[in-house]
């Protein structure tokens, strides 16, 4: 909520949220209805790990750092926040459904459970809060009040992610034993998905700075929420942990390369 109020509701924010939500949804659909892709990504943990990025606690701080360094203009924060909104909305609405065994066996989505998931999603609550603030004409005041807590939460979240990754590395199961599905999931998250978003930005005639910010968000490592959901539903926790750990390490190399490639070829 604080991030959206500080960024302000704009066309770019809405565009980025829509791009993230539809792109992730379309790719999940494509993977599950393509026999070839389904063999490569046989379970939902690999799919979510390959598409849901750490847009909140890594993508937005990266965008802020690039803005402070004058590498990107101030207005691209709307795109970063919007892409995070679309990603978070998709992850917390559909992620729990995908990771529950009984839901995976049902062809049609349970409307009641879907509605509950939609309302209880962190992103949905944030949107409701923003709409209330705007309806009362207090968006600026609320944004100022939430600015410091939002900054503190993001900084603490980065610390938690680092601590969590440290715990993962001490796990008895060797984290570096990656089989082919893991490698494909990592490739999807750090290279294929950002490439798709690059072409989407081209089609939508985004400017260079806007495309750079959006592609960087799409190329962030797998979200820690992938582990949280896997643990909550006792489904492939180790798989989720391996993907998050591996993509986080590799992203320190791939994110600067993505930014460079966008500037060279956009």
Image (cartoon, rainbow, N blue to C red):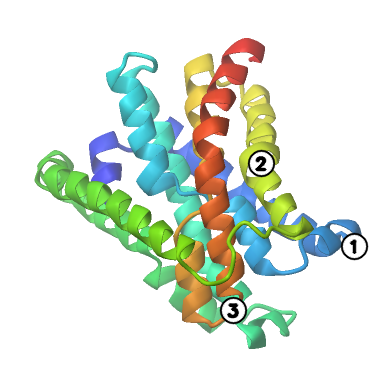
Q: Nearer the viewer, residue 22 or 227?
A: 227
Q: Point out the tag, 1 or 2, that comes first from the N-terminus.
A: 1
Q: CA distance from mark 1 to mark 2?
A: 19 Å
To which residue does mark 3 refer?
235
- At horizontal 56% and vertical 47% (from top left) the residue drawn is 247
Which class describes the residues within 10 Å of circle 3: few (<14), some (14-19), or many (20+)?
some
The x and y percentages for residue 150 are 20, 48
Q: CA distance from mark 3 to mark 2?
A: 24 Å
Looking at the rendered image, the quarter that the C terminus falls into is top right
Instruction: Report if the CB atoms under discs 1 and 3 are less than 8 Å apart.
Output: no
To which residue does mark 2 refer?
193
Which class describes the residues within 10 Å of circle 1: few (<14), some (14-19), or many (20+)?
few
> Toward which corner of the image does residue 36 lie, by quadrant?
bottom right
Q: Nearer the viewer, residue 214 or 136?
A: 214
The x and y percentages for residue 3 are 28, 44
Q: Nearer the viewer, residue 169 or 34?
A: 169
- Residue 114 visible in the snapshot: yes
- Residue 10 visible in the snapshot: no
């Amino acid at each position: 909520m604080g991030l959206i109020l500080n960024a302000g509701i704009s066309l770019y924010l809405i565009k980025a949220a829509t791009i993230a939500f539809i792109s992730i949804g379309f790719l999940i659909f494509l993977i599950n209805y393509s026999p070839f892709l389904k063999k490569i990504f046989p379970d939902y943990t690999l799919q979510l790990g390959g598409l849901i990025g750490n847009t909140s606690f890594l993508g937005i701080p990266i965008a802020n750092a690039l803005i402070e360094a004058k590498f990107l203009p101030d207005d691209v924060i709307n795109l970063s926040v919007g892409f995070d909104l679309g990603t978070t909305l998709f992850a917390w609405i559909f992620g729990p459904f995908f990771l529950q065994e009984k839901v995976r066996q049902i062809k049609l989505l349970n409307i009641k459970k879907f509605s509950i998931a939609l309302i209880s999603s962190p992103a949905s609550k944030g949107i409701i809060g923003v709409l209330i603030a705007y309806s009362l004409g207090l968006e600026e005041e609320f944004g100022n009040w939430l600015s410091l807590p939002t900054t503190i939460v993001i900084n603490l979240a980065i610390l938690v992610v680092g601590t969590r990754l440290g715990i993962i590395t001490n796990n008895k199961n060797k984290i570096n034993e990656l089989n082919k599905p893991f490698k494909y999931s990592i490739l999807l998250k750090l290279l294929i998905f950002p490439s798709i978003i690059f072409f989407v930005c081209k089609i939508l005639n985004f400017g260079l700075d806007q495309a750079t910010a959006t592609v960087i968000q799409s190329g962030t490592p797998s979200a820690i929420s992938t582990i949280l959901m896997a643990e909550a539903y006792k489904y492939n926790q180790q798989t989720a942990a391996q993907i998050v750990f591996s993509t986080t390490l590799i992203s320190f190399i791939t994110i600067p390369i993505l930014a460079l490639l966008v500037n060279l070829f956009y």
